[in-house]
Image (spheres, rainbow, N blue to C red):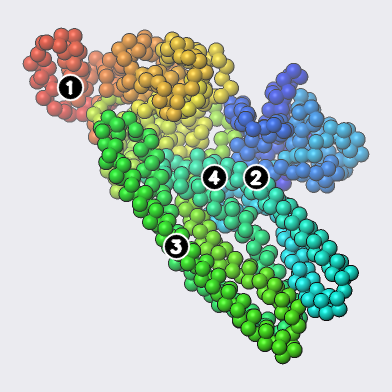
């Protein structure tokens, strides 16, 4: 879009909430929201606050860093530009900058060459001509601004398949630094001509005429050239290192963002170690583009200059060198496909070992409880041996290739010495010329021989790009841009209309033609045998998966038309496996809203029955819970997960076996608080313990993916069918727990053997 065509006017442009002069961060955030409106976006205040949370690494320009993070999160491509105020005026594009006090400014060009300026905390924009802009802005100008344009597709370049152009596009903002690297390489190669020429003059002229004064001058010139070459090489290495580290952050952030955008089905079909191994391939590509690969092409291009100088010494010897170059290059072409196959095997073996190691580290308790350490050790050694063998074959082939190319280089040196000596004897070449020619020939051989190893590195890069394309070319979660349309708050009305679902093309149907309507504020219990489809149904409601047939609607909106992130922020979810992160208790509870005040964290913890045990921890709410909550018991993890689901005040609460790990006292407290948890919310509770469902308005019974019964507890318990069977089993279990020595009643046993009854019609 044309960023000069902005809707911000001198009369104020888009209007926002009243400003607060004592809240610079809030003023900055409101200005970012107004700027987003000029780009056709309409972000909600929740979106802005969530994206504005500090990243923790913003030492310089925190206001501009916040604007950069928020605008990129809203789907815009943002470029950080540096320069003088004059450069900004000449750019003629709308942008955001910050003054010396940390307040943001929204700047847009106007027809007379001036600027329209709106500062954070001001209700109206100010129109300045070019002179006024320079006068008023120069004292506070920081030399950095953000230029915004519409985001490019997330895949490869120009929306195509992922490949090398994606990396080249990332290099584009650093082209000035890379140009300096190439310029340094050019001078280094030019200085390389000095040494051979000095040696030739010393041998042919100085030694012949015994001119010590000339020798002193030549040696000083050689020392100065060597020193200058060393300085240029150091500068080149610094620039490459600086650019490489910036690219590491940029590319790594882009890849991780892409990884987070992938649907759950991507991770379900791949081992975690495979995914981690693919992400690590990014380093191979980056090091090739900004390492030896970049400078080697300049060195290779300078071969033409060296050959021209060599031809001035001896055309026959130059012909020998030119005849050897195709042989060296041909060997590289033969080696490359063979090397690629070995690299593929090396990667596959490494990914297998990494997956096994990650799986082992996450299941150490299960391994020890089964006493299978010795068996697992043998499994690890087998995988390690496979990886070592693949790596050995790959390295041996690479070393053999290097030895072969090195041998060819030595043969070329011997041929040059043989032919060159004959030319010297015949008087067609001086001794100094022969030495200089051999020095130049070594300079020519080095890039050609390096090209052989560079070709092998390129083969590795092609393998790495192919591995990375599995992540980058995988279709992301389908979604809209939530910032472009502000959806109203949810009321919590849910509807499943003829939903069928399977996890894979060749997998059986998990849900079959399931229809269910849930009113706002209703509490629905869901029961059924394991594998009936209860958890899958909750996943569909979160849009972690999309149905194969049918529709899932919330407040009348088809979930396929809702942005996943916006939807999930309306939901509070407690899964069967209460996953916590290696952070503090407070951070885990406020995971979805890092800015949540501590009082709200306490309130959610009390509602979940977690506050009392949390304050008893060594550092209370600041206690680190360990990886996946390993420092806490299963019941404690469950209660923190419940608190996390309640912390952001969701309109819909999904509880999947939330009480499975709770003891009786904790479960009793959960039941006592369930009414308050459910107040004003739509709640779906999946449970095997029917006592958890006593507050449910209706109970839905699933059997083999179908909804077979739905209605109030009293009605279903009185009907012949699966629910009455489950209820009688529940009563029998309760009697056994109350009177462990008493045999079960015969009626209960008969009910247990009754089997399944015909499905009942779902009643609202």
Q: Are marks 4 and 2 in contact (CB under 8 Å)?
A: no
Q: Which residue is tagged 1?
A: 725
Q: Position of residue 633 (x, y in %)?
A: 37, 20
Q: Are marks 1 and 2 in contact (CB under 8 Å)?
A: no
Numbered badge on residue 255: 4
Front residue of 309/119: it is 309
Mark 4 to mark 3 CA distance (whole Å) = 32 Å
Q: If you read the primary sequence from the N terminus, does the residue marked by circle 4 or circle 3 appear first?
A: 4
Q: If you read the primary sequence from the N terminus, does the residue marked by circle 1 or circle 3 appear first?
A: 3
Q: What is the quadrant of residue 53 in the picture?
A: top right
Q: Position of residue 691 (x, y in %)?
A: 28, 15
- Frontmost of labels 4 and 3 is 3
Residue drawn 69% across and 23% down?
26
- Where disc 3 sits, the SS reads helix
Query: Is residue 365 left or right of 308 when viewed as pictured?
Result: left
Q: Are marks 4 and 1 in contact (CB under 8 Å)?
A: no
- Where disc 4 sits, the SS reads helix
Query: Is residue 447 left or right of 275 when viewed as pictured?
Result: right
- Frontmost of labels 4 and 1 is 4
Q: If you read the primary sequence from the N terminus, does the residue marked by circle 2 or circle 3 appear first?
A: 2
Mark 1 to mark 2 CA distance (whole Å) = 64 Å
Residue drawn 50% across and 15% down?
619
Query: Is residue 93 left or right of 487 when viewed as pictured?
Result: right
Q: Which residue is tagged 3?
A: 396
Q: Residues within 10 Å of mark 3 (few under 14, many from 20)?
A: few
Q: Is residue 702 visible?
A: no
């Amino acid at each position: 879009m044309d960023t000069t065509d902005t809707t911000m006017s001198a009369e104020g442009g888009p209007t926002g909430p009243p400003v607060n002069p004592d809240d610079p961060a809030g003023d900055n955030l409101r200005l970012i929201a107004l700027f987003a409106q000029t780009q056709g976006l309409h972000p909600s205040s929740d979106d802005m606050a969530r994206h504005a949370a500090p990243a923790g690494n913003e030492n310089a320009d925190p206001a501009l860093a916040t604007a950069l993070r928020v605008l990129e999160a809203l789907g815009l491509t943002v470029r950080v530009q540096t320069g003088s105020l004059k450069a900004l005026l000449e750019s003629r594009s709308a942008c955001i900058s910050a003054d010396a006090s940390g307040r943001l400014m929204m700047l847009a060009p106007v027809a007379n060459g001036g600027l329209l300026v709106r500062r954070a905390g001001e209700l109206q924009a100010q129109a300045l001509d070019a002179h006024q802009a320079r006068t008023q802005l120069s004292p506070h100008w920081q030399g950095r601004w953000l230029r915004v344009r519409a985001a490019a597709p997330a895949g490869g370049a120009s929306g195509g398949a992922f490949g090398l152009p994606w990396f080249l596009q990332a290099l584009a903002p650093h082209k000035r630094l890379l140009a300096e690297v190439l310029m340094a390489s050019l001078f280094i190669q030019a200085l390389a001509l000095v040494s051979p020429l000095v040696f030739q003059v010393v041998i042919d002229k100085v030694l012949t005429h015994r001119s010590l004064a000339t020798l002193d001058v030549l040696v000083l010139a050689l020392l100065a050239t060597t020193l200058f070459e060393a300085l240029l090489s150091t500068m080149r290495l610094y620039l490459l290192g600086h650019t490489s580290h910036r690219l590491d952050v940029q590319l790594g952030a882009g890849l991780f963002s892409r990884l987070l955008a992938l649907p759950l089905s991507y991770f379900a079909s791949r081992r975690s170690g495979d995914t981690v191994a693919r992400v690590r391939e990014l380093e191979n590509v980056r090091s090739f583009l900004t390492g030896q690969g970049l400078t080697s092409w300049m060195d290779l291009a300078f071969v033409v200059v060296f050959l021209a100088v060599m031809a001035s010494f001896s055309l026959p010897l130059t012909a020998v060198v030119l005849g050897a170059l195709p042989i060296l290059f041909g060997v590289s072409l033969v080696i490359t496909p063979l090397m690629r196959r070995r690299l593929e095997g090396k990667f596959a073996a490494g990914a297998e070992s990494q997956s096994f190691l990650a799986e082992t580290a996450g299941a150490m308790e299960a391994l020890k409880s089964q006493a299978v350490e010795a068996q697992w050790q043998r499994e690890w050694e087998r995988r390690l041996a496979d990886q070592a063998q693949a790596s050995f074959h790959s390295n041996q082939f690479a070393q053999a290739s290097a030895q072969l190319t090195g041998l060819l280089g030595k043969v070329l040196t011997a041929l040059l010495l043989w032919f060159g000596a004959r030319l010297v004897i015949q008087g067609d070449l001086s001794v100094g010329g022969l030495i200089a020619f051999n020095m130049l020939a070594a300079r020519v051989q080095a890039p050609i021989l390096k090209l052989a190893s560079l070709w092998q590195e390129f083969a590795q890069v092609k393998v790495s790009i192919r591995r990375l394309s599995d992540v980058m070319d995988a279709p992301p979660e389908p979604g809209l841009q939530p910032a472009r349309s502000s959806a109203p708050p949810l009321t919590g009305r849910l509807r499943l209309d003829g939903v069928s679902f399977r996890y894979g093309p060749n997998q059986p149907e998990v849900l079959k033609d399931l229809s269910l309507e849930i009113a706002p504020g209703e509490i629905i219990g869901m029961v059924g045998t394991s594998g009936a489809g209860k958890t899958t149904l909750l996943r569909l409601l979160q849009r972690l998966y999309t149905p194969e047939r049918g529709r899932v609607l919330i407040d009348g909106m088809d979930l396929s038309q809702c942005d996943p992130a916006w939807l999930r922020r309306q939901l509070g979810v407690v899964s069967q496996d209460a996953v916590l992160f290696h952070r503090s208790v407070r951070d885990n509870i406020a995971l979805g809203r890092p800015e949540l005040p501590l009082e709200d964290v306490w309130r959610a913890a009390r509602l979940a029955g977690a506050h009392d045990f949390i304050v008893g921890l060594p550092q209370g709410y600041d206690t680190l819970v360990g990886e996946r909550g390993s420092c806490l018991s299963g019941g404690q993890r469950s209660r923190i997960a419940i608190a996390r689901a309640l912390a952001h005040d969701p309109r819909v609460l999904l509880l999947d076996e939330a009480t499975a790990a709770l003891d009786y006292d904790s479960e009793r407290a959960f039941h006592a608080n369930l009414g308050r948890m459910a107040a004003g919310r739509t709640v779906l509770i999946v449970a095997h313990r029917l006592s958890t469902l006593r507050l449910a308005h209706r109970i839905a019974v699933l059997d083999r993916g179908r909804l077979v019964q739905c209605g109030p507890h009293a009605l279903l318990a009185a009907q012949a069918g699966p629910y009455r069977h489950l209820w009688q089993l529940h009563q029998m279990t309760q009697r056994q727990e109350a009177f462990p020595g008493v045999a079960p009643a015969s009626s209960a046993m008969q009910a247990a053997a009754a089997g399944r009854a015909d499905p009942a019609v779902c009643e609202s």
